[in-house]
Image (tube, rainbow, N blue to C red):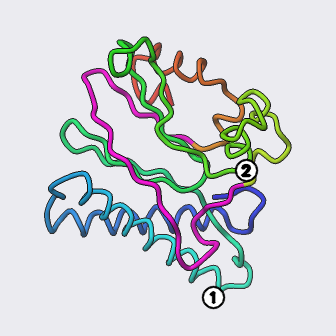
Amino acid sequence: GMGGHQAGEVASALATATVKAYLTEGLSEGVPADDEAWHALLRAAVAEANRAVFEQSQQNPAQRGMGTTLTVAVIAGRRAHLAHVGDSRAYLLNPAGVSGEAVTWLQLTTDHSLVARLVDIGQLTPEQARVHPQRNVVYRSLGGEPTLEVDTLSQALAPGDVLVLCSDGLVNHVEDGELAGIVLKEASVAKAC
């Protein structure tokens, strides 16, 4: 849920439950045949979650204006299929490097935030964005409007790859290198979390 907004915890719980139910039902009818079909399924699941959050927000004055960010990944074979809205993130980590490069930590999603946009156009550095007073201002989230644009992508996975999905609450306080170090060092997923 989005901090500073009413009932953010309600919005995030409702979005999570709705996406899970939608994907469970959709996948019971068959596994998508290609990336585009995965993207369509994920966009529809997130759109349904947005509708549910928006409608509940409109029906209950105590929850009016509630919203949440969302990053979801479904692994099928050696591919990850992701949908994303807001400033939660998905990272790909591989101790042997990503795509043959000496990179071990790759942000897969793009933040839908004011400061991320300012970094994109060269107005801020990533370091300045991390401490900017408006770093939590998002321009896209679930629940704010009846319809929503959803980013989707698919990513090939190699042996040893790890996906890290996290909220801005983590990345605002822990540097990328430190996060990567924790993931690489810890023997279990539970302990890394």
Disc assigned to residue 114: 2
Which amino acid does the dot numbered 1 rest on? Gln
Q: Nearer the viewer, residue 101 or 8?
A: 101
Picture layout, residue 66 above or below residue 181: below
Which residues make up the magenta segment? Answer: 138-166
Q: Nearer the viewer, mark 1 or mark 2?
A: 2
Horizontal and vertical percent position of residue 130: 75, 33
Q: Nearer the viewer, residue 18 or 83?
A: 83
Horizontal and vertical percent position of residue 192: 49, 25
Horizontal and vertical percent position of residue 78: 21, 35
Which amino acid does the dot numbered 2 rest on? Leu
Q: What secondary structure characterizes most of the magenta part?
A: loop
Horizontal and vertical percent position of residue 90: 48, 40
Q: Earlier in the sequence, mark 1 or mark 2?
A: 1
Residue in view at x 59 percent, y 18 percent: 177
- In the rendered structure, does residue 151 fall within the stretch colored magenta? yes
Check disc 1 and report the residue beneath it.
59
Q: Disc 1 to disc 2, how far (Cα)?
A: 29 Å
